[in-house]
């Protein structure tokens, strides 16, 4: 019996440690002043015809060659949610600083800035045109030096590149107030006398190893949604060979635990994605449009949407294209996401995620009460027949079959189920794991205060007060729980609160709060049931 007790404790510890390790085109005439719009079909996909080109320099309208610009410059864009820096090199996004999120849970902490640690030679969403002479690092010209988006409406930022080889590329970013999503239209104009064949490609890069050592980057890597499933890769996955995706791609990007930069398809505008480790040692994602064939005087537009921002479940869902799937909550996502929505619902009314967690705990406890009640009755029944079972084991110690038959008859006579005491715990395991993932990976709880010293429900209790109280309540619960174990086994089980306390020291304080409140409710429940179920 002592050996089995040791094994039970060992398995319990192993399960929780294992979980914590396992467990964020169309055509248009170019030369005339007001060209007639027509549709261009690329790989059987119809892309929207671009608006007529408007440029202060007539050369842009006539498709003539302009002197090459070799000096790159930055263009600043400010909205109510972020400040972005774009570069004329590749008409790319150099960095984006989020106004509502800080790197640390301190008033003096700097705001979260995305993109600064990407490959310095290839900024995010840098554009090339495969098949045409538009390589990485091509310098575009911008139509403005800076842009400020106010509540009055959306505004565009336009980059142009006029090639001396008979084609023009235009990138138009459109920004809207109150939104992290950015519309991107990439237009290619054929100003030559021969057909052009090519593919619009946007390149994103990401560091192999984050500069900042923080648990925010625990799950950092490449993510994309293809063929109705989420694909994720670390740098080691593509270190020796690239990966190619081409089935129903909805979006592709790079993400960490709380933030994501992604390029979303618009009307099947992503034909393929290639992931690789480039020569500089960075992650590189090459997002390609369907191939186009462009007749002289015609143009195509490849439309996409960008998202650079927080992995807030409501914000992600509003982007469409299944971008919400980047919030990977593990095996029990089907339970975890409703729990997260419930937390946000209650937060709207109480204004504190800690209180919202307490409300959810109470609701879950009430939901499982009938099952728990039945379980405790079964354990009480097992406790009552323990002396008779001991006699049967002694009587049939040399005849195992006879002993099992006699024990089963005893169970039927007293209407007890030996597995009844385990059922509530088994049923609640998926809920516990789902809540663990919800609290661990939801940006909503990041830097969310509860009270006094608990200022971040997504981080551990800095003074370990709640884990210690949780361990004490677990010990009290163990003492109150009916048991049919021998004294040695009971002593072994009483060691579990100590083990769990040390495990919970590094868990998010939001999860510790859930477990603590759950223990308190269980103690009250056991007191109530003990009054109902008399010996």
Image: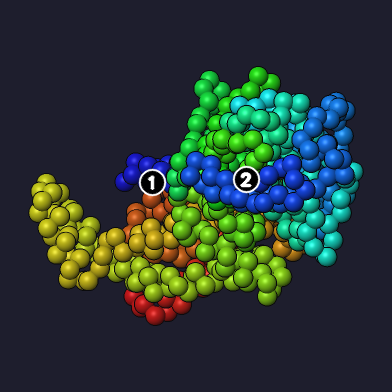
Q: Quadrant of residue 219?
A: top right
Q: Which of the labelled discs sits on residue 373, or is there none?
A: none
Residue found at the far right of this picture: 145
In this rendering, the answer to whether 471 lies above or below 72 is below
Q: Secondary structure at mark 2?
A: strand
Give the CA separation, mark 1 to mark 2: 70 Å
How many C-alpha atoms fall within 10 Å of the one at disc 2: few (<14), some, or many (≥20)?
many
Quadrant of the image containing the C terminus: bottom left
Q: Which residue is mark 1?
A: 8
Depth check, front residue: 352 or 241: 241
Marks 1, 2: nearer the viewer: 2
Side of 65 where 456 appears, left or right: left
Q: Residue at x 83, y 36 (%)?
A: 59
Name the residue tied to disc 2: 27
Q: Residue at x 47, y 60 (%)?
A: 335
What residue lies at 63% left-to-right and 23% top-to-bottom? 278
Left or right position of 409 against 5: left
């Amino acid at each position: 019996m002592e050996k089995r007790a040791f094994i039970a404790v060992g398995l319990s510890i192993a399960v929780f440690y294992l979980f914590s390790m396992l467990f964020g085109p169309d055509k248009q005439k170019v030369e005339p002043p007001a060209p007639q719009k027509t549709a261009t079909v690329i790989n059987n996909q119809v892309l929207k015809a671009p608006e007529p080109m408007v440029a202060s320099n007539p050369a842009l309208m006539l498709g003539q060659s302009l002197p090459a610009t070799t000096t790159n410059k930055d263009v600043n864009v400010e909205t109510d949610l972020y400040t972005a820096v774009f570069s004329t090199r590749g008409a790319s996004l150099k960095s984006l600083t989020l106004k509502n999120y800080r790197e640390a849970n301190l008033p003096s902490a700097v705001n979260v800035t995305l993109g600064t640690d990407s490959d310095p030679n290839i900024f995010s969403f840098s554009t090339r045109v495969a098949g045409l002479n538009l390589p990485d690092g091509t310098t575009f010209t911008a139509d403005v030096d800076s842009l400020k988006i106010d509540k009055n409406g959306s505004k565009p930022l336009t980059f142009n590149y006029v090639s001396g080889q008979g084609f023009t590329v235009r990138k138009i970013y459109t920004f809207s107030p109150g939104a992290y999503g950015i519309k991107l239209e990439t237009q290619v104009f054929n100003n030559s006398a021969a057909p052009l064949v090519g593919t619009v490609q946007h390149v994103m890069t990401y560091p192999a190893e984050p500069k900042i050592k923080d648990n925010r980057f625990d799950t950092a890597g490449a993510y994309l949604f293809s063929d109705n499933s989420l694909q994720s890769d670390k740098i080691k996955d593509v270190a020796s060979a690239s990966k190619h995706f081409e089935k129903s791609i909805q979006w592709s990007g790079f993400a960490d635990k709380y933030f994501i930069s992604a390029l979303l398809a618009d009307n099947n505008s992503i034909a393929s994605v290639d992931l690789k480790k480039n020569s500089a040692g960075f992650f590189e994602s090459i997002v390609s449009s369907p191939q186009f064939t462009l007749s002289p005087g015609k143009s195509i537009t490849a439309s996409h949407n960008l998202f650079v921002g927080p992995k807030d479940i409501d914000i992600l869902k509003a982007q469409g294209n299944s971008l919400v799937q980047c919030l990977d909550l593990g095996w029990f996502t089907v339970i975890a996401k409703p729990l997260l929505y419930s937390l946000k619902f209650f937060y709207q009314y109480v204004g504190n995620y800690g209180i919202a967690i307490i409300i959810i705990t109470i609701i879950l406890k009430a939901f499982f009460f009938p099952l728990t009640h039945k379980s405790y009755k079964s354990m009480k029944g097992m406790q009552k027949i323990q002396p008779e079972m001991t006699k049967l084991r002694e009587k049939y110690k040399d005849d195992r079959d006879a002993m099992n038959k006699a024990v089963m008859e005893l169970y039927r006579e007293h209407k007890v189920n030996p597995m009844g005491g385990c059922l509530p715990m088994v049923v609640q395991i998926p809920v516990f794991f789902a809540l663990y993932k919800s609290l661990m990976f939801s940006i909503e709880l990041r830097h969310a205060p509860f009270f006094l010293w608990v200022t971040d429900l997504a981080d551990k209790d800095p003074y370990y007060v709640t884990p210690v109280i949780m361990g004490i309540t677990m010990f009290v619960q163990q003492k109150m729980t009916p048991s049919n174990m021998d004294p040695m086994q009971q002593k072994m089980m009483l060691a579990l609160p100590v083990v769990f306390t040390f495990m919970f020291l590094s868990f998010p304080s939001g999860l510790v709060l859930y477990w603590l409140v759950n223990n308190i409710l269980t103690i009250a429940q056991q007191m109530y049931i003990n009054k109902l179920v008399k010996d």
